[in-house]
Image (cartoon, helix red, strand yellow):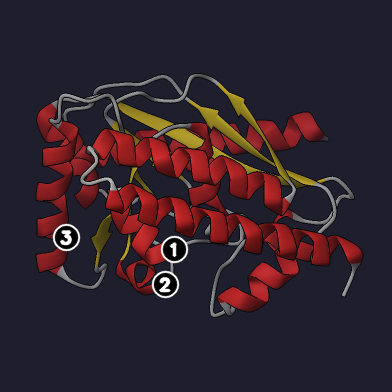
């Protein structure tokens, strides 16, 4: 066990304990608005980034409403995006069953989808419409690839859950996520994809040297067709990631 991994593991465990205490204190104080829940998640995410030794850089203006679509590399994406802005995530159903994190996600207003169920997708689309019409400035965030990848390419975006935004005429913002390891190790070492065990991956992340997360936000745009929105934001995110890689070289 390296000293770096040990320090991060202890710091993360401590942050989780503090978060659990704060979580139950908030529950004891009574109901909180969805907006306040999203802000609570943002505050916790910023703490987790610090514990994991992740610095983050943000380019562009984080969205304040509408739908945000992003590429998906790891569970780390959720922490990175949450730290950058309050938002409601659309996440896979399995996350809802994770110890502590699942409960925290539910309390933070996450909408869970069973990606293999048409009925679930319809229900989630209705929930997204409700959130997008709330009189609060908190965007909904979606990973339209439908799964996390190793970062070698941005998979084609599924458009079904982009439909709530296009049908309501609310702005859609593209967000490109990228990880940079300072010693030149490939980004895929931080990506959680395939069948890799969550605990094993987190243990590996705790031992990685200095690294940072980069999030680049595009300009919010209104689309009238969900497929056109999916294709346009996909191209925008792929271009932003490619440009970022070229600048690094």
Is there any visible trace of residue 140 in the rendered image? no
Left or right: 194 in relation to 214: left
User: What's the mark number on residue 121?
Assistant: 3
Q: Residues within 10 Å of mark 3 (few under 14, many from 20)?
A: some
Taking the spot 43% from the left edge, 44% from the top edge, the residue there is: 41
The residue tagged 1 is 101
Q: Is residue 42 above or below residue 13?
A: above
Are circles 1 and 2 on residues that touch, CB within 8 Å? yes
Q: Residues within 10 Å of mark 1 (few under 14, many from 20)?
A: some
The residue tagged 2 is 98
In this rendering, the label closer to the viewer, 2 or 3 = 2
Residue 228, percent from left and from top: 26, 35
Residue 198, percent from left and from top: 57, 74
Taking the spot 83% from the left edge, 35% from the top edge, the residue there is: 249
Residue 2, percent from left and from top: 90, 69
User: What's the mark number on residue 114?
Assistant: none
Are circles 3 and 1 on residues that touch, CB within 8 Å? no
Residue 171, percent from left and from top: 26, 24
Taking the spot 50% from the left edge, 54% from the top edge, the residue there is: 19
Earlier-in-chain disc, 2 versus 3:
2
Q: Is residue 39 above or below residue 7?
A: above
The kind of secondary structure element at disc 3 is helix
Earlier-in-chain disc, 3 versus 1:
1
């Amino acid at each position: 066990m390296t000293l770096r991994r040990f320090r991060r593991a202890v710091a993360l465990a401590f942050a989780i304990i503090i978060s659990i205490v704060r979580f139950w204190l908030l529950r004891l104080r009574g109901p909180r608005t969805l907006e306040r829940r999203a802000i609570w998640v943002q505050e916790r995410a910023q703490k987790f980034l610090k514990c994991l030794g992740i610095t983050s850089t943000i380019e562009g203006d984080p969205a304040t409403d509408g739908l945000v679509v992003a590429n998906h590399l790891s569970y780390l994406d959720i922490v990175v995006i949450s730290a950058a802005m309050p938002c409601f995530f659309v996440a896979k159903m399995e996350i809802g069953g994770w110890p502590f994190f699942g409960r925290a996600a539910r309390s933070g207003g996450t909408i869970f989808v069973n990606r293999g169920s048409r009925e679930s997708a319809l229900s989630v689309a209705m929930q997204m419409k409700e959130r997008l019409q709330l009189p609060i400035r908190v965007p909904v965030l979606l990973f339209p690839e439908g799964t996390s990848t190793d970062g070698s390419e941005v998979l084609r975006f599924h458009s079904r859950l982009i439909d709530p935004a296009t049908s309501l005429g609310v702005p859609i913002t593209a967000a490109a996520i990228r990880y940079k390891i300072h010693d030149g190790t490939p980004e895929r070492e931080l990506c959680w994809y395939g069948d890799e065990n969550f605990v094993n991956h987190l243990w590996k992340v705790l031992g990685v040297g200095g690294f940072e997360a980069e999030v680049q936000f595009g300009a919010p745009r209104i689309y009238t067709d969900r497929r056109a929105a999916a294709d346009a934001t996909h191209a925008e995110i792929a271009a932003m990631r490619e440009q970022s890689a070229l600048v690094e070289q």
